[in-house]
């Protein structure tokens, strides 16, 4: 298979993947109480949104929930540099995940669930980017 066809195939796979990352980044809304909030939904095998932008040094609340279904999902953000150590299971009912990013830059968030010898959810695309701006 030549390079062009591989490219077309990759594009088709990407288009067929649920929750493929086509959406715009979402900027957390800064509420009157000084907390920046974003709703995040997890499903098989995606986060929506998959690119979240927050401000540095301001408390964040991710309002996290998962789509219906038996598959468990989690939300992990680990960046010692940014002072972030989040590891929460997601439920049907929204849960609030609180943290305050202490440095600018980018880190990933992902689901660390995995069934036996199957690829992890993260490997199946259940991951996103947390962007911390000035
Ligand atoms: Cu998952």
Image (tube, grey):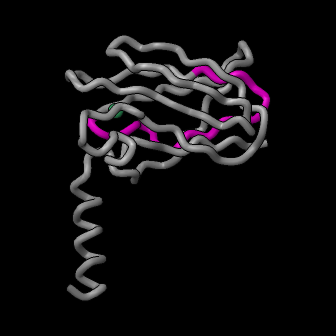
Point 46% across, 13% down: residue: 95
Seen at 72% across and 13% down, the residue is 33
Q: Quadrant of residue 42?
A: top left
Residue range of the region highlighted in magenta in the rendering: 44-61
Residue toward you, 96 or 27: 96
Give residue 111's position: percent from left, percent from top.
41, 34
Q: Position of residue 46 (x, y in %)?
A: 35, 40
Residue 120: horizontal and vertical position, in percent?
33, 41
Decide if residue 33 is on the left or right side of residue 120.
Answer: right
Q: Left or right: where does residue 78 sit relative to residue 32?
A: left
- Report x, y in % for residue 51: 52, 44
Magenta stretch: residue 46 in it?
yes
- Residue, x 71% and y 35% (percent of image)? 80
Residue 50 falls inside the magenta stretch: yes
Q: Is residue 121 left or right of residue 52?
A: left
Quadrant of the image for the C terminus?
Answer: top right
Above or below — where is 54 with respect to 65? below
């Amino acid at each position: 298979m030549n390079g062009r066809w591989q490219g077309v195939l990759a594009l088709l796979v990407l288009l067929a993947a649920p929750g493929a990352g086509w959406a715009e980044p979402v900027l957390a809304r800064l509420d009157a109480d000084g907390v920046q909030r974003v709703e995040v939904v997890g499903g098989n095998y995606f986060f929506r949104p998959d690119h979240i932008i927050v401000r540095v040094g301001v408390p964040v609340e991710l309002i996290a929930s998962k789509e219906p279904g038996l598959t468990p999902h989690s939300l992990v953000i680990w960046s010692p540099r940014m002072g972030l150590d989040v590891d929460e299971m997601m439920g049907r009912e929204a849960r609030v995940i609180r943290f305050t990013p202490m440095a600018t830059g980018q880190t990933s968030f992902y689901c660390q669930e995995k069934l036996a010898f199957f690829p992890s959810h993260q490997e199946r695309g259940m991951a996103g980017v947390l962007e911390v701006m000035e």
